[in-house]
Amino acid sequence: MSKPLEVALLSAPMSERGPWFSTLRLTRRFAIYAISIFMIFGPLSSLLLWSVAEKWFWPNPFPTQWGFKYWQQAFEGKMLSSLGLSFGIAIVVSIICLVITVPLAYVIARNRIPLKHIVLLIFLLPQAFPQLPVFSNVMVLMYRWDLVGTLTGLILIHLVGALVFSLWTLVSVFQSIAEPLEEASYMLGGSRIYTFFHVVLPIALPGIIASTLLVFLYSLDEFTGSLLIGAPYHITMPVFMYNAAGGYEMQVASVTSVLLMIPGILLLFLLQKYMRSEYLAAFGRV
């Protein structure tokens, strides 16, 4: 269809538009859906194919031999220990972030702190620069404190980025809660501690859960700091996948990717449930 004809169809009244207009709209929608599906599921389908491909040689478009040989090898090797380590570190990092950032975010959201913007920017700085130079400088400090190659150092390097997600998210959560609710509790005789635990926290619970899920996903997929600080003594799943891919073990790397992808997808569905629009509206507002 020529451009003038397309413009004429779009500018014509609905009663004068013929079947060409409906065909054009359907074609556009189909093209958008097809491109979106390909962009999302194209790489995922490649991972799934490689994870069950025992033999796959050029120029065959699909594996010549299928099976779960590499799934069995992955579970019999060191992958399970890496998987358990990644989940364990992610849980510990999430708990530490909650303990630190819940009271800190509430104080920032509810009080006029001098240089409040500077405080939040300091937490944001590790994410404002490429991770490799940031973690490399942190690694120099950890060498001085004998933390490289230890679980403590691995948890601390995860906290560098996790605190950013947790603090900024929780500040927006507490800012979205109406202050008159707290004032009503004070007027009825409730103390600050009582009001915080019995009024503010129940309302903020969905946002706290969303923040925890973000931190957990970040820690589960963190690679650069885990490679610099933990390897070769503590191998997390992303580092295990990197080593497998570097050794051209595409099937093992694909199995690892699928196992990392499954909890990520499930947690993102939960995140969609608990993340509310008012949190996003207050995000970054201090």
Image (cartoon, helix red, strand yellow):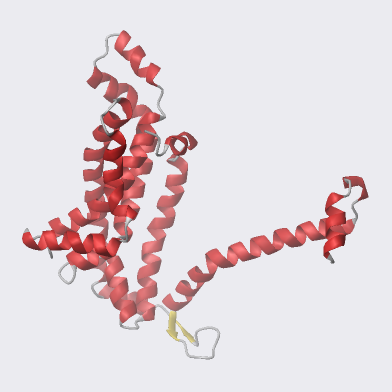
The answer to whether residue 92 is left or right of residue 172 is left
Asked whether 194 or 7 is in front, the reply is 7
Q: Residue furthest right?
A: 16
Query: Residue at coordinates 80% horizontally, 60% vertically from top-left?
Result: 24
Residue visible at 65% across and 65% down? Answer: 34
Q: Is residue 127 above or below residue 190?
A: below
Total labels: the figure holds: 0
Say left or right for 230 vs 207.
left
Q: Quadrant of the N terminus?
A: bottom right
Residue 35's quadrant in the figure?
bottom right
Question: Horizontal and vertical percent for residue 200?
Answer: 33, 25
Q: Quadrant of residue 134?
A: bottom left
Residue drawn at (54%, 91%) of the image: 59
Outermost residue toward the top in this view: 188
- The vertical placement of 223 against 50, above or below, is above
Pinpoint residue 126: horizontal percent, then vertical percent: 28, 53
Residue 277's spot in the image, x, y percent? Answer: 49, 37
Q: Quadrant of residue 235?
A: bottom left
In this orientation, which residue lies closer to the viewer: 176 or 275?
Answer: 176
Image quadrant where one finds the C terminus: top left
Q: Height in image: 168 above or below 161?
A: above
Q: Position of residue 170 (x, y in %)?
A: 34, 37
In this rendering, does residue 131 appear at all? yes
Residue 84 in sight from this viewpoint: no
As drawn, 128 above or below 70: above
